[in-house]
Amino acid sequence: MDYDIKDINLAEEGKSSVDWANKSMPVLNNIKKRFEKEKPLKNVRLGACLHVTTETASLMETLKAGGAELSLCASNPLSTQDYVAAYLVKYQEIAVHAINAEDTTTYYRHINSVLNAKPTITMDDGADLVSTIHSSRQDLIDGIIGGTEETTTGVVRLKAMASEGVLKFPLIAVNDANTKHMFDNRYGTGQSTLDGIIRATNRLIAGSAFVICGYGWCSRGLAMRASGMGANVIVTEVDPLRALEAVMDGYRVMPIAEAAEEGEFFCTLTGDINVIRKEHFLKMKDGSIVSNSGHFNVELDIEGLKNVSEYTGRIREYIDEYTLKNGNRVYILAEGRLINLAAAEGHPSSVMDMSFANQALAAEYLVKHGNELDNMVYSVPEDIDMEIARLKLESMNIRIDVLTPEQHKYLNSWEMGT
């Protein structure tokens, strides 16, 4: 088995951590039990580019139980938990190619190592696997049934490919499932992003001016949590509807050029490039703390910041100080990469339970229906979404009502009025 990890001797630590995560993932464990019996992924070669965390290990165990032959690489250079990579290699015999803090060359070498296994299904977190296939590994396309995508950023990239007619196999947008983005993006990102910022800085959130760039599901979650800890939340947006929603949710809304002068903490969660630029850095207060929780580190114009700085240096793990030409200091967390995975441990396992349940069931769906699909980006089928919600409620010992025949008829007819 081919693999490239930091240290196989970390496997015992990884085993304990994965076991701990598994205790909060009842939906995925339920699916795993069925997969062990039915083997719906038998003869499938599944190539995954995901954050190599304890929760991802639980997903890998489920897919392996379903019969899949697996290869895994990291979807972000700083998100790999090296002890998890070691566990997957030693105890699960899964080909892992991931090392925390790997450079860009190694990152793409690892992606190509996964592709060398000739996957028949891809599983992506940011669409780097799919984009690499389409740009430099087109020899693999004919053998691919389809793939899945975990993130907002990746879905945006894939839909752009589909609209331009260059997408060569069907993709399922796992991110668009209600049991993913309404919970993982909002509650998972909200908690884990704040966790990463606090772990990196040990600064007090209460009473601070906290600027959040964007107001999608991830930003909504962060705004909710930062506000709950006593921050004065300011939102920047380009979408008038989302901006209006932020106002109605009780937050101040203004352009980033104005927010830059008021903020003490800044976090980008937009999926776009250069959201905070050098002209914004120059307006910031001395000691401003800047982070990113979007998938790629392009949201912060780090090169522009360097150009207007006289000094840069690492002053603490995950904190780089930039002394601007005007004398003010700006602190960038985790090199502008995903703060919740670089400085913390990512989303809690109980919320990733639903996200990864979607991944597992979407892979099963592709095996059954992939040859019926066009080269487009598809939503997760509604019955899968609803089944995951049902299983999650069941695991929480929560029961809900069922429509009576009379109610069902009323909702599906037009004859009855007031």
Image (cartoon, grey):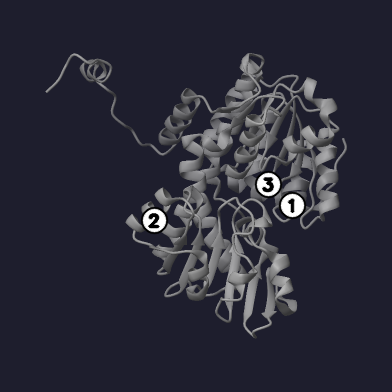
* Residue 128 point in image, percent of width and height: 73, 41
The mark that comes first in sequence, 2 or 3, is 3
Identity of the residue drawn at 88% across and 38% down = 2
Answer yes or no: is residue 317 visible. Answer: no
Residue with the mark numbered 2: 246
Label 2 to label 1: alpha-carbon separation: 40 Å
The 10 Å Cα crowd at callout 3, few under 14, some 14 to 19, many 20 or more, is: many
The mark that comes first in sequence, 2 or 1, is 1
Identity of the residue drawn at 39% across and 56% down = 246
Above or below, 41 relative to 215: above
Residue 226 shown left or right of residue 369 in the figure: left
Position of the N terminus by quadrant:
top right
* Amino acid on which the number 2 mark rests in the picture: Ala
Q: Are marks 2 and 1 in contact (CB under 8 Å)?
A: no
The 10 Å Cα crowd at callout 1, few under 14, some 14 to 19, many 20 or more, is: many
* Amino acid on which the number 1 mark rests in the picture: Tyr
Query: Which mark is nearer the camera, 1 or 3?
Result: 3
Label disc, if present, on residue 83 of the rendered structure: 1
Above or below, 86 relative to 112: below
Dot 3 lies on which element? loop
Dot 2 lies on which element? helix
* Amino acid on which the number 3 mark rests in the picture: His
Residue with the mark numbered 3: 51
Q: Are marks 2 and 3 in contact (CB under 8 Å)?
A: no
Position of the C terminus by quadrant:
top left
Label 2 to label 3: alpha-carbon separation: 30 Å
* Residue 60 point in image, percent of width and height: 68, 36
